[in-house]
Image (tube, grey):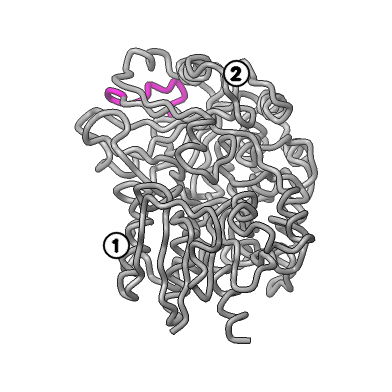
């Protein structure tokens, strides 16, 4: 019987394990941490009973993932929930913009830019079922829906600053800028629109759902399916050399390219080694979780019903903050994402005490005082929600360095596992037609460093496992 070892148990490692096991491979998962799940773990970080997501929180691409559909994760207990609004972006004076599932409802709230928003995202949302299937795989492939993909590409290829100029007024410009900032890159670069366009379109097509009970429910659903195929797991063990698992026919590494090089040593061919060494990580996330009484008193009323709130100010402010972070400078007012998962999933709260999720974009490996960024996050929320500070009951801080300690794939706090510059959006993790291959027979990379990149969709692991199975068949 063919055997496989999967190193790492993030959503991609778990997806790879399940894909292999369902094909008849005997699979063992080895995880360095004491708990399985990688980026889809949840825990009581502040007060007893409050469920906080430790990294991945909202899952706009999960419903478009063929992996989730193929293995019926809903049938394994995974339940998706939505807040009343997907996203709010407050501005000064209790104004702002809100993104709802309905394109027309979103457009109606954007004044003079409503028609432009409708023209931009309406056709994309209508076709997103096919479009998502195209970009949730390696960029270099023969498309099944070239016309749909071409329209998506027309808005994704330019810099975000150029797409932002399609909109004339601050609310729509800020709304798009905040979504584009998820790329963790300078927004004047080619392809810096891609992630923003994809996320905004996904919000209209599928929403930004949360997993009931916490993101760990994604892990639990995949593990239930793995249990049907007798997949075994081992935690608290770090693999440092391929010799430790040399008895396996297949090895899939849910690791960074750098970690893969350390494990594989001189077995990696020179061309692959050079590509992996050139792989770049992006800026970091500095995460603060709060336990808060009653909720956040947002001045901009729609933010009180939005699952996600972006605090970036006007479009130009977001662009400037992301430029500073990319240059290694902490902005005085960094871009902050706030997650109010309990609005969709009240089971995460205890009475009127709620878990609030937040992180700020910071330079890679930022090692300044925790108090500086924590206070910057609180100040940004307080700016748009006067009285917030008085509602804080407890906090849990995880710095950029702490993010890497929590998950070795988050180098320098890089929760996207790789810089989202133009080269790495097209060639990830290296230039070549086989992004999952390491050049070592039977060994594959399956982390978010491979296509299609970050997210709890599981497609990196699923596609890497399918590549391994195809090679095995040959």
Query: Left of 180 or right of it: where is 296?
Result: left
Total marks shown come to 2
Residue 297 sits inside the magenta stretch = yes
State the mark number for residue 333.
2
Residue in view at x 56 percent, y 74 percent: 466
Q: Is residue 384 above or below residue 470?
A: above
Quarter the C terminus occupies? bottom right
**Residue drawn 45% across the image and 68% down it:** 17
Q: Can residue 169 be seen?
A: no
- Relative to 13, is 419 on the left or the right? right
**Residue 77's disc number:** 1
Element class at badge 1: loop
Rendered location of residue 212, percent (x, y): 31, 50
**Magenta residues, start to end:** 292-302
Label 2 crowding class (10 Å Cα cut-off): few <14, some 14-19, many 20+?
many
- Residue 95's image quarter? top right
Badge 1, how many Cα within 10 Å: few under 14, some, many 20+? Answer: some
Q: Judge from the rendering whether residue 48 lies leftward or rightward of residue 82; answer left or right.
A: left
Which of the two residues, 155 or 240, is positioned nearer the viewer here?
Answer: 240
First reached walking from the N terminus: tag 1 or tag 2: 1
Query: Which quadrant, please, contains the N terminus?
Result: bottom left
Q: Is residue 289 visible?
A: yes
Magenta segment main secondary structure: loop
Residue 75's x, y, as percent? Answer: 31, 68
23 or 264: nearer the eye?
Answer: 264
How far, Cα to Cα, is label 1 from label 2? 40 Å
Q: Where residue 442 appears, x then y in whole percent?
A: 59, 73
Residue 295 position (above or below residue 376): below
């Amino acid at each position: 019987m063919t055997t496989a070892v999967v190193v790492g148990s993030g959503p991609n490692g778990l997806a790879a394990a399940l894909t292999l096991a369902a094909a008849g491979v005997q699979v063992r998962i080895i995880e360095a941490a004491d708990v399985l799940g990688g980026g889809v773990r949840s825990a009581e970080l502040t007060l007893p009973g409050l469920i906080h997501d430790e990294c991945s929180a909202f899952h706009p691409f999960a419903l478009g993932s063929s992996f989730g559909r193929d293995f019926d994760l809903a049938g394994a207990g995974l339940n998706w929930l939505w807040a009343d609004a997907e996203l709010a972006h407050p501005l000064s004076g209790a104004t702002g913009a809100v993104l709802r599932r309905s394109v027309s409802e979103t457009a109606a709230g954007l004044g003079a830019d409503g028609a432009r928003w409708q023209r931009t995202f309406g056709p994309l949302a209508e076709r997103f079922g096919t479009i998502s299937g195209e970009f949730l795989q390696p960029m270099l492939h023969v498309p099944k829906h070239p016309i749909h993909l071409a329209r998506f590409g027309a808005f994704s290829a330019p810099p975000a600053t150029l797409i932002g100029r399609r909109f004339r007024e601050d609310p729509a410009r800020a709304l798009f800028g905040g979504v584009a900032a998820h790329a963790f890159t300078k927004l004047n670069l080619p392809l810096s629109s891609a992630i923003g366009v994809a996320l905004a379109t996904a919000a209209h097509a599928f929403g930004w759902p949360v997993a009931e009970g916490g993101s760990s429910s994604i892990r639990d659903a995949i593990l239930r399916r793995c249990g049907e195929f007798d997949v075994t797991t081992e935690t608290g063990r770090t693999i440092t050399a391929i010799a430790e698992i040399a008895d396996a026919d297949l090895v899939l590494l849910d690791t960074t390219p750098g970690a893969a090089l350390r494990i594989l040593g001189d077995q990696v061919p020179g061309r692959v080694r050079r590509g992996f060494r050139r792989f770049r990580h992006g800026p970091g996330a500095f995460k603060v979780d709060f336990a808060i009484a009653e909720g956040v008193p947002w001045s901009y009323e729609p933010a009180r019903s939005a699952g996600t709130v972006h605090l970036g100010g006007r479009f130009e402010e977001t662009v400037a903050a992301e430029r500073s972070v990319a240059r290694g400078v902490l902005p005085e007012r960094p871009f902050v994402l706030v997650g109010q998962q309990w609005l969709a999933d009240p089971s995460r709260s205890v009475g009127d005490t709620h878990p609030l999720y937040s992180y700020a974009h910071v330079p890679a490996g930022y090692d300044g005082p925790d108090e500086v960024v924590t206070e910057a996050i609180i100040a940004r929320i307080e700016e748009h929600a006067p009285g917030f500070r008085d509602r804080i009951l407890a906090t849990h801080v995880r710095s950029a360095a702490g993010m890497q300690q929590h998950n070795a794939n988050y180098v320098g706090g890089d929760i996207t596992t790789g810089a989202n510059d133009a080269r790495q959006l097209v060639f990830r993790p290296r230039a070549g037609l086989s992004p999952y291959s390491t050049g070592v027979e039977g060994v594959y990379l399956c982390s978010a460093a491979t296509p299609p990149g970050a997210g709890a969709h599981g497609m990196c692991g699923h596609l890497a496992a399918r590549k391994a199975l195809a090679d095995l068949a040959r």
